[in-house]
Amino acid sequence: MSGETKHVQELALKLPIIEKARLVDRLLASIDQPDSATDKLWKKEVEGRIEAYKAGKMKSVSLGKVLAKYGKNI
């Protein structure tokens, strides 16, 4: 880690929690760039799942059941 990066980190760690959250959001958004190859793979996956569901090869699960499985209540 460069000296400048360490300095920025030290300053960021002193920020109020809401400002830290905003900073994290901006930083993550700056590295979340579109990737056409990944997008194509996800599109193929989603279309395959939809077809499997329509053909009766895949069942759906309610959101409530999924959240209950992981200990969340809605």
Image: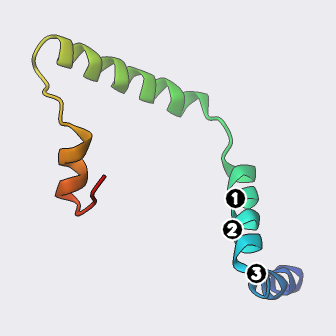
Tell me if residue 27 comes above or below residue 49 in the rendering: below
Amino acid on which disc 2 is placed: Ala
Quadrant of the image containing the N terminus: bottom right
Q: Earlier in the sequence, mark 3 or mark 1?
A: 3
Q: Are marks 1 and 2 in contact (CB under 8 Å)?
A: yes
Residue 51 location (% of width, % of height): 24, 13
Q: Nearer the viewer, mark 3 or mark 1?
A: 3
Mark drawn on residue 21: 2
Amino acid on which disc 1 is placed: Asp
Residue visible at 10% across and 20% down in the picture: 57
Count residues near mark 1 (Cα–Cα under 10 Å), then give few for <14, some for 14-19, many for 20+.
few
Residue visible at 89% across and 81% down in the picture: 4
Count residues near mark 2 (Cα–Cα under 10 Å), then give few for <14, some for 14-19, many for 20+.
few
Residue 28 location (% of width, % of height): 68, 57
Horizontal arrangement in the rendering, residue 73 relative to residue 65 (left or right): right
Q: Which residue is mark 3?
A: 16
Residue 44 location (% of width, % of height): 39, 21
Horizontal arrangement in the rendering, residue 1 relative to residue 46 (left or right): right
Residue visible at 86% across and 86% down in the picture: 7
In what element is the residue under mark 1?
helix
Q: Earlier in the sequence, mark 2 or mark 3?
A: 3
Amino acid on which disc 3 is placed: Pro
Q: Which residue is mark 1?
A: 25
In what element is the residue under mark 3?
loop
Horizontal arrangement in the rendering, residue 56 relative to residue 42 (left or right): left
Q: Are marks 2 and 3 in contact (CB under 8 Å)?
A: no
Tell me if residue 28 comes above or below residue 34 in the rendering: below
Residue 33 location (% of width, % of height): 68, 41
- Tell me the CA gap for discs 2 and 3: 9 Å
- Tell me the CA gap for discs 1 and 2: 6 Å
In what element is the residue under mark 2?
helix
